Amino acid sequence: MTNDQIMTTETMTTATTRDTQVFDLIAKEQHRQESGIELIASENFVSPAVLEAAGSVLTNKYAEGLPGKRYYGGCEVVDQVEQIAIDRAKELFGASWANVQPHSGANANMAVFLACLKPGDTILGFDLSHGGHLTHGSSVNISGKYFRPTFYGVERETGVIDYDKVEETAMREGPKMMICGASAYSRDWDYARLRAIADQIGALLLADISHPAGLIAKGLLNDPLDHVHIATTTTHKTLRGTRGGLIMLRNDFENPFGIKTPKGELRMMSSLLDSGVFPGTQGGPLEHIIAAKAVAFGEALTDDFAAYASRVQANAQAMARAFTDRGYSIISGGTDNHLMLIDLRSKGNHLTGKLAENTLIKADITINKNMVPFDDKSPMVTSGMRVGTAAMTTRGLVESDMERIVVYIDEVLTNHDNDAKILAIREEINEWMKAFPLYQV
Ligand SMILES: *Cc1c(COP(=O)(O)O)cnc(C)c1O
C-alpha cells in the first residue's frame, strides 16, 4: 500500500484539490447555472446557508427511526435538527404533523401509497399527458404498476379541469385514493370540491403540492391542507430548499382501514405514514438534507420569502402576458402560479418542444419540452414547452426582465436555423447575467 492509498485527515481535506475530475465538473456546472437563464419550472437556487447544511458532516450519521425513537446511538444532535425541521414545516403550512424524511417527492408519494393502499387498489390521478406527475399512476411508475390507475384531465377547449367530469369519473371508477396536484398545470385547484367528491365515494384525498408549495405556504394560492386528508410536496421547487420530500397532515385521524395497535386501538394516520416512510420505503434518513430542509423552512417563514413568492407569481403573470402578446398560446390562457405550459403549434407546426429545448439551450436558456393536452406528438418530441419563474426570481429578476427573456426566446425560436444570431444572443445573456451574481466565491 502506498502513502497515497491510506486515507488520512490530510487526504480528506485536500480532496477538493486532488479530485479534479469531479470538482472541475462541479465548477463547470456552477458556471453554467450562473451564466444562463434558468426557466425549468421545477428548479430553483438554494441559499448559501442551505447549501452549507446540505454539505455538512451530518451526512456521516445513521438515524433510522424518529427523533427520540432511534435505532442507533449518538442521535442527540440530529434529533434536535430533525425536530426543528418538523416544527418549522408544521408552522409554515399550518400542519399538526409532518414527516421530513422522504428523500424526494416520489418517495413521499410512495410512502403514502404504502400506508394507504394495497396492490391492485384503484387510484384516480391527473393525467400525466395533461400536466400530471408520473408518480400519480403512470404505467411506467410503481404507482401505475402496483395499483389500478384511472385518470381525469383538462378540457380540450379550455385547458382547465372540469370538476363535474372529475366527479363522474370518480363515481364510475370508485378509487380508494384520489390525487390532485401537477407538474405542468398553471391553474389553482378547487380542493373543497375535490374533498366533497372524495367524501361521496369514501376515498382518501391526497394533494401533491410539489410545484406551488412555496406559494401555498405564503397564502398566495388556495390552501389544500384545509380540505385534503394528506399532503405531500418536494422541498426544492418554489419552496427553494434542498432536493427532498415532505408529508403533512393538518388534522390527524384514525385510519379507515381497521389497522390496530397492539393495544387494540385504531392506529392514527400519522403513525401509518411514519411507517410508510420508514421502514416501509426507506432506510436511514439523510440528516444533512434534513438540516438543509430546516434552514430552508426557516427562510420560508420570513417576510422576505413572502415578498419573493409574490414576485414569483407576478413575474409568471408578466411572462404569460409577454408570450401571449407575441402570439404564443398558453394552455388555459394564463397562469395563477409560477409556471405555464405553451403550445408551440401556435407558432407553426414545425416548432416542436424538442426543437425549442435544443435550440434555446444554444443561447443558454434552459426550458423543458413538455406534452400539451391532446398532443399529437410523442413524449420525446412534444408540442409544448414548460417554463417557470421561481429560479430567475431568486436571482433578482423583475417583471420587465420577464419581457426581455420572452423577446430572447422568441428571437431564438424564430431564428432557430441561424447559429450566428443565436450565439450573439447567448453572449448578450451571459453578459446580462453577470449583473445577478448567485454564489460569490
Ligand atoms: C417534481 C414532482 C414530484 C417528484 O419529485 P422528485 O423529488 O423528483 O421525486 C412529485 N410530484 C409532483 C407533482 C412533482 O411536480
Image: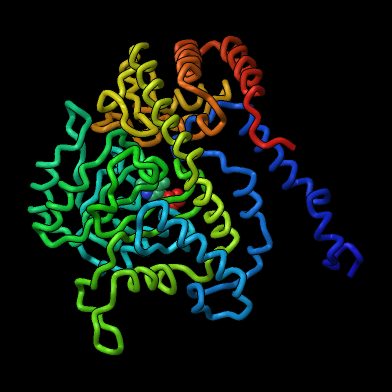
The residue at the point 49 percent across, 51 percent down is 297
Determine the image quadrant of residue 143: bottom left
> Horizontally, is 100 left or right of 171 in the view?
right
Where residue 393 sits in the image (x, y, percent)? 50, 30
Where residue 427 sits in the image (x, y, percent)? 64, 16
Where residue 438 sits in the image (x, y, percent)? 64, 33
From the viewer's side, name the closer residue of 57 and 304: 304
Could you tell me which quadrant the C terminus lies in? top right
Determine the image quadrant of residue 279: bottom left
From the viewer's side, name the closer residue of 42 and 169: 42
From the viewer's side, name the closer residue of 248 and 87: 87
Where residue 290 sits in the image (x, y, percent)? 54, 60
Determine the image quadrant of residue 431: top right
Residue 29 at least partly seen: yes
The residue at the point 50 percent across, 66 percent down is 83
> Horizontally, is 23 left or right of 118 in the view?
right
- Above or below, 168 against 90 in this view is above
* Furthest residue toward right: 3
The residue at the point 44 percent across, 38 percent down is 306
